[in-house]
């Protein structure tokens, strides 16, 4: 695994919202930890596993600074308090469309009702419809299409009024 593949993996984990990912192969062991809102970015540790009698080699990668500034995050959190957050009930891959050639289930500004399908989450080759539990207007979509999501990860902000 070269440095470009490692950097690509770091970017993928950062976008996914996962807090920690461990990857272990025959000759390399990688642990990537992303920070929550209070820490300062990501920490990546790359360690060579000894092949024979060689000493283990640890290659720490410099921490990547968080792209978000704290002040705008605090302001948006205050604005978002009046909205209802719809969270992922499962771990999987988030899709906004039922298939690549179909339109999205919902867009920002759409009015939704209880039971409307908002997205699909693929888990172990099974596609699960995620339905709305409330009625309202979609204010924000918090996840990119075709990206991995964790359990209880926020997906949508809905204005119930």
Image: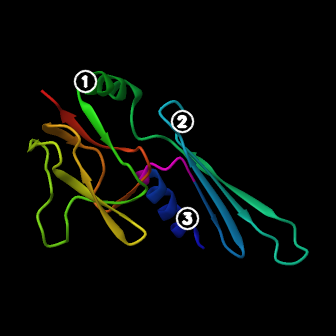
Identify the residue at the far right of this view. Answer: 53
> x and y percent of residue 111 in the render?
8, 41
Identify the element where label 2 is drawn.
loop
Say left or right for 89 vs 105. right
Label 1 or label 3, whichever comes before in sequence order: 3
Label 3 or label 2, whichever comes before in sequence order: 3
Does residue 17 belong to the magenta stretch? yes
Label 2 or label 1, whichever comes before in sequence order: 2
Q: Residue at x 20, y 66 (%)?
A: 98
> x and y percent of residue 56 in the render?
82, 65
Residue closer to the observer: 92 or 59: 92
Identify the element where label 1 is drawn.
helix
> Which stretch did the figure color magenta?
15-20
**How far is disc 1 from disc 3 in space, using C-alphas?**
36 Å
Q: Residue at x 47, y 64 (%)?
A: 8
The residue indicated by pointer 1 is 79
The residue indicated by pointer 2 is 40
The residue indicated by pointer 3 is 6
């Amino acid at each position: 695994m070269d440095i470009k593949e490692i950097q690509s993996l770091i970017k993928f984990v950062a976008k996914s919202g996962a807090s920690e990912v461990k990857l272990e192969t025959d000759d390399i062991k990688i642990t990537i930890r992303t920070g929550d809102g209070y820490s300062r970015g990501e920490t990546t540790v790359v360690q060579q596993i000894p092949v024979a009698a060689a000493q283990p080699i640890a290659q720490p990668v410099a921490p990547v600074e968080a792209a978000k500034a704290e002040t705008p995050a605090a302001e948006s959190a205050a604005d978002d308090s009046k909205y209802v957050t719809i969270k992922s009930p499962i771990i999987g891959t988030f899709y906004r469309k039922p298939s690549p050639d179909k339109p999205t289930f919902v867009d920002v500004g759409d009015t939704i009702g209880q039971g409307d399908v908002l997205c699909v989450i693929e888990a172990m080759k099974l596609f699960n419809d995620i339905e709305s539990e409330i009625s309202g207007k979609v204010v924000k979509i918090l996840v990119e299409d075709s990206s991995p999501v964790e359990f209880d990860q926020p997906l949508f902000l809905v204005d119930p009024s």
